[in-house]
Image: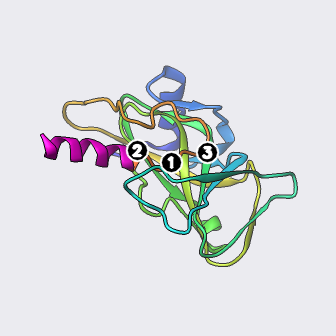
Amino acid sequence: MILTGPEITTAVRDGRLTISPFEPDQVNPNSYNVRLGPTLLTYTADVIDAHQPNPTLSVEIGADGYVLQPGELYLGHTVEAVGSDTFVPLLFGRSSVGRLGLFVEITAPIGDIGFLGQWTLMLSPIRPLRVYAGMKIGQIMFFLACGGIDLYRGKYQAAQGPQSSRYWRDVARIQAAVAS
């Protein structure tokens, strides 16, 4: 069951859902618009290695915006911290942004119950595209969970700003378990 816009507003007001800051005019018929935060990360190594931390460069989006380049992966973040211990969130790019040739959150739209923080956005443009901090970049839908709930306690909890991959931590644990 997906939450309607009025139910999203009710859930924020009664505490079952956190959206901070919450703006009533960002509520849609069955989703909530999220905005692009002011910081972007890009990986600086020629080859990204899944088995180790990768160096990144942080860029602040100025008042004149920032031009995203094709062939580059940008990690952005939402202005809003979003989360719930009750609902499963799914984040997608807005269709108006997709029509500009920007892929948003290509591979990981589902959030975990219990996560609360700013969402990292994976941004990939088809053509050079100027983006602006605060622009509506995506929308989050919320689904009611069925069954027992095991709250998220993972490595990205309470994220602030864009988060680079921490996949290498999982690899290290798996390698240690296999070795023992």
Kind of residue at badge 1: Ile
What whole-number distance in Å separates the C-alpha atoms at marks 3 and 1? 11 Å
Comes first in the chain, label 3 or label 1 = 3
Q: Can residue 30 be seen in this view?
A: no
The part of the chain drawn in magenta is 168-180
What whole-number distance in Å separates the C-alpha atoms at marks 1 and 2? 10 Å
Q: Is residue 81 visible?
A: yes
Q: What residue is at 31 percent from the left and 29 percent from the top?
A: 151
Q: What residue is at 47 percent from the left and 64 percent from the top?
A: 106
Q: Is residue 4 above or below residue 51?
A: above
Q: Quadrant of the C terminus?
A: top left
Which SS class for mark 2?
Answer: loop
3 to the left or right of 130? left
CB atoms of marks 3 and 1 within 8 Å = no
Circle 1 residues within 10 Å: few <14, some 14–19, many ≥20: many
Q: In which quarter of the image is the N terminus?
A: top left
Q: In this view, does 170 lie above or below 155?
A: below
Which SS class for mark 3?
Answer: strand
Circle 2 residues within 10 Å: few <14, some 14–19, many ≥20: many
Instruction: Return the mark for residue 78.
Output: 3
Instruction: Return the mark for residue 140.
Output: 1
Instruction: Return the mark for residue 158.
Output: none
80 to the left or right of 30? right
Disc 2 target residue: 111
Query: Residue 173 lies in magenta, yes or no?
Result: yes
